[in-house]
Image (cartoon, rainbow, N blue to C red):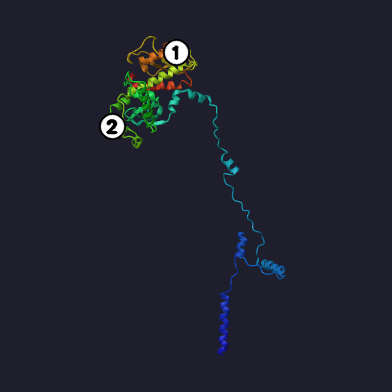
């Protein structure tokens, strides 16, 4: 009896153990069916063919069909969605109600040609800059550009206008020292050495540092000349102080800066007028009176030179058109007229009279051309610079 119970318990335990260790069917065939992912099987060594390979292959096919495995081949031709940048239909729908701006033409239009000849439009089109004294943000045409230049002899930094810095190195020494002439008995070799020193100093000039801008009015420069050195150092741009090549206390400001700038502007205008009068294109035409002025074509500006042979000694004694005066032309245009004796003074007026026949009469008309744009801009700027000298009501 005891032997039979023991045998029965052993059989029950063996059957229980066999059920727990039974291997469940692999889910890989179903995963391959739905995801179309090839199943990588472990490599096995080929066995010897005993002539039953065909029968075993048929058995495997039948067993696979019984299990419901898929016979479809794996396809790797997957198509990604089309990018919006490549979809022509989408791009056409987006740009359906948009009109593209036409490409700029190589030939300027009539309006662009008029703007190129208009000095007021060109003045307003200059980059906007801030005044170091007043803080006003204006087009750079209405401001004076100042930079730094090393003195030819002492090597100290001077705050100078761009008109003086950009001039020739030989004339730069004269502008810095207009009253300092060389002695009569100095040899030619010493003159050459002086010019070489001035040229080498100008090459060392820290002009590459960004400039400072001040309102283009004579009264502003007079006010800055009256300031103390401590106050002037506060107006120096921060980028100059951070440069490291010089100290802010060492920068020198001319006491006669207003007169110095005035002489530079006058010299530039006289040089431009002389050049235009020497050209064969007749950019400047002499006229007797207002009636002769109205007959001229394409007038850009009119200069009043006064009666031939008369020279005024001061602005108060100068007669003629008032500041910002205009002339009505027959083309329904208002043309500015400049009082040359009041703007340039008697010395430069004599130089213009001797330049040629364009300035031997009372009036002279400057044509509205691109070549005369610079002189028109300089005349208008000089008028604004000397506003405080005139009794403008």
Q: Residues within 10 Å of mark 2 (few under 14, many from 20)?
A: few
Residue 77 is situated, as x and y percent measured from the top left of the image, at 63, 53
Q: Which residue is mark 1?
A: 358
At x 51% / y 24%, what residue is drawn?
113
Where does the C terminus fall, quadrant-wise? top left
Residue 370 is situated, as x and y percent measured from the top left of the image, at 48, 22
The reply to whether residue 301 is in sight is no
Which is nearer the N-term, disc 1 or disc 2? 2
Most extreme residue toward the top, as rendered? 309
Contact between marks 1 and 2 (CB within 8 A): the answer is no
Q: Is residue 14 above or below residue 390?
A: below
Q: Which residue is mark 2?
A: 231
- Spatial CA span between label 1 and label 2: 48 Å
User: Residue 191 lies in what quarter of the image?
Assistant: top left
At x 38% / y 22%, what residue is drawn?
265
Residue 355 is situated, as x and y percent measured from the top left of the image, at 42, 14
Q: Which mark is residue 366?
A: none
Looking at the rendered structure, the secondary structure element under dot 2 is helix
């Amino acid at each position: 009896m005891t032997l039979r119970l023991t045998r029965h318990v052993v059989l029950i335990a063996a059957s229980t153990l066999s059920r727990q260790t039974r291997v469940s069917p692999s889910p890989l065939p179903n995963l391959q069916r739905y995801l179309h992912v090839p199943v990588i099987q472990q490599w096995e060594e080929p066995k010897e063919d005993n002539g039953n390979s065909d029968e075993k292959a048929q058995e495997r096919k039948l067993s696979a069909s019984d299990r419901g495995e898929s016979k479809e081949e794996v396809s790797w031709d997957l198509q990604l969605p089309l990018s919006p940048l490549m979809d022509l239909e989408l791009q056409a729908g987006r740009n359906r109600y948009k009109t593209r701006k036409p490409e700029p033409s190589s030939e300027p239009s009539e309006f662009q040609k008029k703007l190129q000849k208009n000095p007021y439009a060109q003045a307003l089109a200059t980059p906007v800059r801030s005044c170091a004294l007043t803080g006003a943000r204006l087009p750079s045409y209405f401001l004076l550009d100042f930079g730094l230049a090393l003195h030819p002899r002492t090597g100290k930094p001077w705050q100078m206008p761009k008109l003086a810095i950009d001039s020739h190195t030989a004339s730069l020494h004269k502008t810095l020292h207009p009253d300092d002439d060389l002695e009569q008995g100095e040899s030619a070799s010493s003159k050459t050495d002086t010019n070489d020193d001035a040229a080498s100093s100008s090459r060392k000039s820290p002009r590459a540092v960004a400039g400072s801008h001040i309102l283009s009015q004579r009264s502003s420069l007079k006010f800055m000349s009256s300031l103390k050195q401590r106050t002037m150092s506060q107006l120096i741009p921060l980028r100059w102080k951070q440069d490291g090549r010089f100290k802010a206390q060492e920068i020198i400001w001319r006491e006669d800066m207003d007169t110095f700038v005035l002489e530079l502007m006058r010299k530039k205008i006289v040089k431009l007028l002389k050049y235009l009068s020497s050209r064969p294109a007749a950019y400047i035409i002499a006229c007797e009176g207002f009636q002769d002025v109205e007959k001229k074509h394409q007038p850009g500006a009119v200069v009043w030179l006064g009666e031939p042979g008369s020279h005024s000694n001061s602005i108060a004694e100068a007669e003629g058109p008032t500041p910002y005066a205009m002339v009505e032309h027959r083309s329904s245009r208002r043309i500015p007229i400049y009082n040359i004796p009041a703007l340039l003074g008697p010395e430069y007026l004599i130089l213009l009279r001797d330049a040629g026949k364009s300035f031997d009469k009372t009036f002279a008309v400057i044509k509205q051309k691109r070549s005369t744009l610079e002189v028109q801009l300089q005349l208008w700027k000089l008028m604004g610079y000397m506003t405080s000298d005139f009794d403008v009501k």
